[in-house]
Amino acid sequence: MKIVALVKHVPDAAADRTFNEADHTTDRTNVDGILSELDEYAVEAALKIAESGDAEVVALTMGPDAALDAVKRALQMGADSGAHVADDALHGSDAVATSAVLAAAIQKIGDVDLILTGMASTDGGMSVVPAMLAERLGLAHVGFVGELNVEAGSVRARRDADVTETVEAALPAIVSVTDQINEPRYPSFKGIMAAKKKPVETWSLADLGVDAGTVGLAAAWTTVETVTKRPERTQGEIVTDEGDGGAKLVEFLAGQKFV
Amino acid sequence: MPFELSAEHETFRKVVREFARAEIAPHAAQWDLDHHFPVGVVRAMGELGLFGLTAPEEYGGSGGDLTSLCVAIEEIGRVDQSLGITLEAAVGLGINPILNYGTDEQKQRWLPDLTAGRALAGFGLTEPGSGSDAGATSTRAVLDGDEWAIDGAKQFITNSGSDLTSCVTITARTGTTDAGEPEISAIIVPAGTPGFTVEPAYHKLGWHASDTHPLTFTGARVPADHLLGARGKGFAQFLATLDDGRIAIAALAVGCIQAMLEASVAYANERTAFGVPIGRKQGVAFQIADLHVMAESARLLTYRAASLRDAGAASAAVKQAASVAKLQATEFAVTSTRIATQVHGGYGFMEEYPVARFYRDAKILEIGEGTSEVQRLLIARGLGLPVE
């Protein structure tokens, strides 16, 4: 069985995240990048399946040179190999283009039985790439999965969306997992040393046969017009209860249009 | 001479830092207050592979070097000195003697659980009447048939009475040498052996979340094959394991200094007095600059000693470098807590700020695994001085 875990390299949410001034794309160079925390759950889910049976785990990312770190982290956690799609023309790609590139990469990896992703990226946070990928690859898609079991030729998944439901899908399939599915492991020292020797493929758009004109900022369906810095946090308002605390709270909430 | 850690060591440092920030830092103050040994997080450290870092893979270890262990101890110690010493002692005093001197059977029996952090082992050398003076050991073990019968007492024994403790290696007099000197041997005593009593934990100045007990042995009997290493070599074996331990303690001290530096920089930028951050005052800023110098120099000495050890340098060179690192790093650590507390003013005396905890934790660094005085003695001897 071959599992592809999608791993996105994102700016560390703990740091001060910014946008590039020139084109309002996410600044990926001046901020420390990490493997998106939500994708760690996908890697862990893949490793758990691999450990309980016979499966190979490939970590796949798309992004600038530094995005390789997301693949490395997955390899340190225990993935077997990695693939990195890097091409200057990808700068500013939207979700539609991203799904096209990742679909091409998954086809190039070949014979993939299961694709696991996080429920969203921690930077863009759109949660649409898994469904788009499924559409492009003609696969079943199960999103927001909190429990996952692989059986012969199929997956059984507990989907935690508006309602909780258990669904089955025939393999190959694409499954996005929530932060409820497991507790991702930290890479061990042994894992870090072992990762040095694991193979990583680097592919350009040409390698994947994707037309550079269909991706990148110019081809994006949406553009960010302006960026405004979040206002500094202001001191909270303290309501002292002099018998009318409830009324004052309602007054405050109504004033802020919360009620 | 370029001197820096490898990319893998730096990656490992980031992972341990992440772990320490998420799993330890939020609870360190409470564990300290409650004198609570956090078994769950110790096991999690085991799953991360910290206890088995330097052990060979055949015993469940990672086959890593001393440098990697120092990185782990520094980063854990940066948020919690109690867990830093728990790791240091578990490897240096728990695992290493069995690894270095154990028979295949002893290694197979004890090491897999110890390297995985599922179990901890202690080392009982110090007694009420003997510390650095190990020749004064009064605990006795008598071979009676095919069993050792052990009587005596040990004190200040780390990791000796936790829920995870599987055994304690002790030194005991097993006879008298031809020269009339006490014959000291090491014996592994499994936890739960009748006659082996773990006394209630100490009330310590610091390291509140670490597990330290006095132990008493009253006719405790263990099989003859629990002798660790050669009979009569117990003390020599122990001394040989101390060099690595000194470098590891130095790494724990580096973590302490780094924590004091970071806490002081943050506080001096945030706390205002007379309308400006106190970091604008030279009296404060210069002290913090000194903390940085201490962190850098202690770190360099520590990792240089570790790299000499890892590169297989001559024993005398490693010993000297280990003593120099241990002495300087631990004395800087104590000084750094004093400075950081001063920078924090009255708040530094309050347990709400971590500097107060580090202030209490630091002092023992100058004492454990060879006092500063012992280090100076060793360094002076290394220089060829006829010091007694």
Image (cartoon, helix red, strand yellow):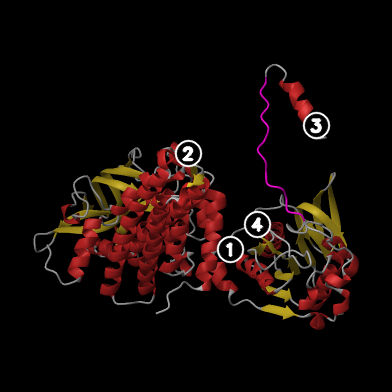
- Return the residue at label 3: A255
- Return the residue at label 4: A16
Q: How far is disc 4 from disc 3 in space, using C-alphas?
A: 31 Å
* Residue under the point 79% across and 83% down: A207
Q: Chain of mark 4?
A: A
Residue A70, picture quadrant: bottom right
Q: List x then y, in percent, for residue A107.
A: 83, 75
Q: How far is disc 1 from disc 2 in space, using C-alphas?
A: 32 Å
Query: Mark 1 or 4, which is nearer the eye?
Result: 4
Q: Which residues are magenta?
A: A228-241
Main secondary-structure element of the magenta-colored stretch: loop
Left or right: B9, with B326 as reference point:
right
Query: Mark 2 or 3, which is nearer the eye?
Result: 3
Q: Chain of mark 2?
A: B
Please state which of residues B166 and B35 is positioned toward the viewer in this rendering.
Answer: B35
Q: Sort mark 1 into few (<14), some (14-19) or many (20+) by Cα contacts within 10 Å.
A: many
Which residue reaches farthest top?
A: A243
Mark 1 / mark 4, whichever is N-terminal: 4
Tell me the element at label 1.
Answer: loop
- Return the residue at label 2: B352
